[in-house]
Amino acid sequence: MPSAIEVHGLSKRFGPVHAVDDLSFEVAEGRVTGFLGPNGSGKTTTLRVLLGLVSITKGTATFSGKRYVDLDHPVRHVGAVLEATSFHPSRRAEDHLKTVAIGAGIPLERVDETLDLVGLSEVARQRVGKFSLGMRQRLQLATALLGDPQILILDEPSNGLDPQGIQWLRTFIRHQASIGHAVLVSSHLLSEMEETVDDVVIVSHGKLVLQTTLAELASRAGTSTGMRIRTPEMARLITLLNAIPVAYRQTAPDMMTIDGATPEWFGPFAAQNQIVLYELVHDRGSLEDVFLSLTHGFDATDPGLMGGNHAGPGSMPGGSS
Amino acid sequence: MIRIMRSEWLKLRTTAVPWVLTGIALIINALLILAIFLTRPDTNGRGGGGTFVSPGYTVPHTTQQLRNLVGSGFQGYLFALLLGTLLVTSEFRHKTVTTSFLVTPVRATLVAGKLLTSAILGAALAVIMLVATVIGGGLTLSARGGSFSDLVHQIPAVAPGMILVFALFAILGVGVGSVLTNQVAAIIVVLGWFIILEGILTSLVHSAFKWVPTGAAVAAANLTRDRGADFGLFNWWQGALLMLGYGLFFAALGSFILTRRDIT
């Protein structure tokens, strides 16, 4: 059975620019997949290729094995929120949705339902020209949801949303996955997606850097990098540390960093030696640090470095967690 | 296809475009009707085109004068043309084309839907203008002592050709809009051709007139009289075919270009 979304060996060139370069990944049903990478890494192009808006130079991009253009009822199968899509400013919100519903053969009752779902019922009769960025984003989402699709593609959906809107979107996306729908959501910030995604597809310079589960990525992030300590007994602490094989740096008269130390080791050590501590901080790599090191450290001229190791179908998520 | 056409009509009528275009067309038509009544007849007894010597009123009464009055909105085909053009270009201007292509991913199908929708709307515009002309012109005519029923009798001679021409021009508009998706460029090219370039071309090469869209339209409009040959034009169905050919040529070219175009 084909995955909800399959991208295989996809390349897209705009003239001399390789926007997407031999990219392969899959999106499983019932899971939220974060499509992550810095701005300009080819995320939007990949999503537009999937939706048949941008032509393919090489490779395939399919939904349940079919190209978007070959789907019987595209809007009822796949819903999409894309950047750089807009509305006619003098058209009312509900009329915009009606044009889509009529064109796609969706009952008009869905218009009110989706407006209600995204919280735009009260402005249904307002012209879209007066809408804020956040309201437009909600209307985009309503458009994507009209056909109650099993697959959702969201390109930077939290742009323009206020904190409540972002929280609402998270809950909404999780709900979609819980009822078995596949969600592919792009972002240039992993931190924004940490609470939402199950799997991650990380791209940089149009190439796959890594496809894995969030849990696996998090385990990389958990690695301890050391302890930061503030103490009034600096001289005594230094004497004690000099007696054992440990690297430390004094960063201020009353502060130091001990490389590779963990609280489990340092806590008892300080207690045994009765050292007064004002501050004790465990330094640990964040998920965002891992993401940044993956996307920035990745050298486009060295494709074997990471993309090759993780791009194979063997490392696909879903079965592994 | 019905769905696409209904969607296209909803898209259009939820913007100001059709109402503004129809409004302007009717205002110009009203001015033209007024001009007919204010113009003295020339020696051939035809209304319009005569010199305005002193204030006075003409009351159209000959068959040709009455037909000219009924068909005074004929030049409104330019608005049918703009309607068709805007049906495509406004989608690009407001970036709604992404959504339209998501709903109808086979792009040629969307263009076909727009062609059919615009043909119907073009015909509808012709009907609106005819009705307005007959009512407005007819009332003025009666007030001036002319015969309303004489005017009504000339409708069958004028209306079919005018409706056909408006529909064909709307199709041409969709074709041109599909090729030139930039709204400003499309409007400039369309108006530039029909208001300036075509006139220059045909004044330089008289025989070219029967081949240009306006010549074809005038021939097609003679549907009920088939007098095209009298003016060195094609007969009505040849003119209509030529018009349709122009429209479909641009639409096919536009579909070809649009199908290959990346919507980013």
Image: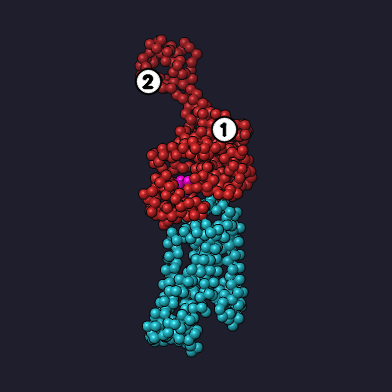
Is residue A144 rendered magenta in the image?
A: yes
Where residue A214 appears, as percent x and y from the top left, is: 51, 31
Is residue B171 rendered magenta in the image?
A: no
Q: Is residue A34 visible?
A: no
Where residue B239 appears, as percent x and y from the top left, is: 59, 74
The residue indicated by pointer 2 is A279
- Given the current orientation, which residue lies at the most extreme bottom position? B43
Mark toward the start of the polypeptide (2 vs 1): 2
Where residue A41 appears, as percent x and y from the top left, is: 54, 41
Question: For the N terminus of chain A, which image quadrant?
Answer: top right
Chain ID, mark 2:
A
**How far is mark 2 from mark 1, CA to CA?**
41 Å
Given the image, on which type of amino acid does mark 1 rest?
Pro
Given the image, on which type of amino acid does mark 2 rest?
Glu
**Residue sitting at 41 percent across and 72 percent down?**
B27
| Magenta highlight range | A140-145
| A176 is higher (above) or lower (below) than A54 | above
Q: Same chain for marks 2 and 1? A: yes
| B187 is higher (above) or lower (below) than B34 | above
Q: Which mark is residue A317?
A: 1
Front residue (pair A122, A57)? A122
Q: Which chain is cyan?
A: B
Q: Left or right: A215 with respect to B24?
A: right
**Residue sitting at 44 percent across and 39 percent down?**
A172
Q: Left or right: B194 with respect to A59?
A: left
**Residue sitting at 37 percent across and 83 percent down?**
B143
Front residue (pair A317, A265)? A317
